[in-house]
Amino acid sequence: MALFLAASALAAQDLPPEITAATDALMAECRDVGGEPGYSANYITSTDLNGDGQPDYLQNVMEFGCAGAWSYFCGSAGCPVTIWLSTPNGLHRAWSGVAQEARLEGASVVLFLHGAFCNPPAAGVEGCESTLRFTP
């Protein structure tokens, strides 16, 4: 658990209210099932994905821990991932789903998906990589 930060550290990052609310909901859900929430520094990563000069965010629940209920959020298909894009009216969810891996590469998000989420669908062990790009 040493890699995970205390829940109050998120507020110190001064993140947009949409991400703070989504994280608060995860923390409450974890506590509701008897777990203790925490997250690593890679739980929220940021870059400009849509070219508008404002930060966009990758929220990767693989980097969110729920001690005492470790498998509550994630399974063999992966963990919840949300891509938040900036707009003049705040952030909106541009993509939300389950991935086995999610990372920023420049202005793209690279996901590794369970085979069931590939096109065409395949066995789980036959996953695929998917690169998401966004335009303003």
Image (cartoon, rainbow, N blue to C red):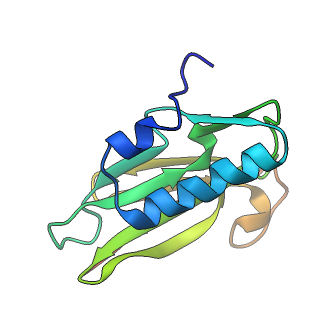
In this view, the residue farthest toward the top is 2
User: Measuring 50% from the left and 28% from the top, which residue is drawn there?
Assistant: 5
Residue 102 position within the rendered picture, expressed as x and y whole percent measured from the top left: 52, 49
Work out whether 126 lies above or below 34: below
User: Measuring 14% from the left and 67% from the top, which residue is drawn there?
Assistant: 53
Work out whether 102 lies above or below 98: above
User: Measuring 73% from the left and 66% from the top, which residue is drawn there?
Assistant: 117
Work out whether 20 lies above or below 135: above
Locate the C terminus by quadrant.
Answer: bottom left
| Quarter-of-image position of residue 109 | bottom left
40 sits left or right of 61 in the view: left
In this view, the residue farthest toward the left is 53
Number of disc labels: 0
Q: Is residue 129 visible?
A: no
Residue 28 position within the rendered picture, expressed as x and y whole percent measured from the top left: 69, 52
Residue 108 position within the rendered picture, expressed as x and y whole percent measured from the top left: 36, 60
Q: Can residue 116 be seen in this view?
A: yes
User: Measuring 80% from the left and 49% from the top, which residue is drawn there?
Assistant: 32
| Quarter-of-image position of residue 65 | top right
Locate the N terminus by quadrant.
Answer: top right
Residue 63 position within the rendered picture, expressed as x and y whole percent measured from the top left: 57, 38
- Between 28 and 128, the residue placed more toward the observer is 28
Work out whether 53 lies above or below 126: below
- Between 12 and 117, the residue placed more toward the observer is 12
| Quarter-of-image position of residue 18 | bottom left
